[in-house]
Amino acid sequence: MTESIPVRIFPDRTEASRTLALELAALIRTINESGRPAVLGLATGRTPLPFYGELIRLHREGQLSFAKVITFNLDEYLGLPGNHPESYRAFMRRELFDHVDIPAENLNIPDGMVPPEALEAHCAAYEELIRAAGGIDFQLLGIGRTGHIGFNEPGSPRGSRTRKVELDPITRQDAAPAFGGLENVPEYAISMGCGTILEARRIALLAWGAAKADIVKEALTGPVTDQVSASFLQEHQDATFYLDAEAGSKL
Ligand code: PGA
């Protein structure tokens, strides 16, 4: 049986991001006080930018330390070196890691330059690192117009794990401006699977703007199907959608 996913709709993305940042800061503190590091699953794209801005602000104000935080990013483009500005490794440094006190050895992002013959072992090792860290306490997600979470495009099985994935044409189109043209957008990525993501103990999905309103509605109220990987969140015990008014306008 599926439960409905709690939805929180805010006037704008700043307020939504501020609320979630305060919640995450409290969660990190609670976990750290229990004597262990907090394990975060992180996302890239335009959506998390205001949220990362709020985390940095809390850190600068002395309200949040990342000294005992371990992170795992959802995905990375295949074929992009870590110093390519559109690689997710570069994105994370620019938008969050360079501005907080997180130890470099605590950051985990799939390696987009892993050679084909080592790819399967690299993906298995990523899963093992997550397990060895004790699993993900808090997973941040955006949602693509294909309904993807991570790069789990339509057809990604419920039980899928970290693996090589082919990007949907819509996803590549959405990335084209940042890459200066569709021809520059990678065709493949490494992504945590739906199964990997669903094992996180708490999940927050963020969506902003009218362009996301239809897919947000489908994920929340449509059938649970591998055609919309975000719909699997309907079967998660502790997932919440944080929306601005526009993304929530079709609900
Ligand atoms: P966006 O991408 O944040 O750039 O809209 C979201 C996603 O594809 O998950």
Image: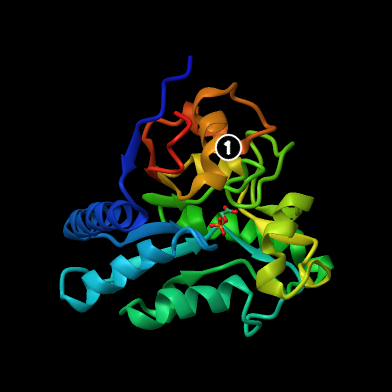
Q: Nearer the viewer, residue 164 or 148?
A: 148
For the rendered model, the colour scheme is rainbow
The answer to whether 175 appears left or right of 134 in the picture is: right
Q: Is residue 202 visible?
A: no
Q: Residue at x 44, y 35 (%)?
A: 249
Q: Is residue 53 above or below residue 199?
A: below
Is the residue indicated by label 1 positioned so its CB lies within 8 Å of ligand 1?
Answer: no
Q: In the image, what residue occupies the spot 30% across and 62% down?
A: 37
Residue occupying the point 32% across, 38% down: 8
Quadrant where ligand 1 appears = bottom right
Q: Position of residue 242 (x, y in %)?
A: 37, 44
Determine the residue located farthest toward the top in the rendered image: 1
List the residue tagged with mark 1.
Answer: 215
Left or right of 227? Residue 239 is left
Q: Position of residue 148 (x, y in %)?
A: 62, 44
User: In which quadrant of the rendered view does residue 215 lie?
Assistant: top right
Dividing the image into 4 quarters, which one contains the C terminus? top left
Q: Nearer the viewer, residue 237 or 34?
A: 237
The residue lying toward the viewer, choosing from 193 and 59, is: 59
Which x, y percent locates residue 60? Answer: 22, 78
Q: Taking 34 as reference, is 187 left or right?
A: right
The amino acid type of the residue labelled 1 equals Ile
Q: Is residue 65 above or below residue 245?
A: below
Q: How many marks?
A: 1
Estimate the x, y position of residue 4 in percent, counting from the top left: 41, 23
- Quarter assignment of residue 54: bottom left
| Label 1 secondary element | helix
* Viewer can see residue 46: yes
Q: Is disc 1 surrounded by few (<14), some (14 to 19) or many (20+) residues within 10 Å?
A: many
Q: Is residue 193 above or below residue 175?
A: above
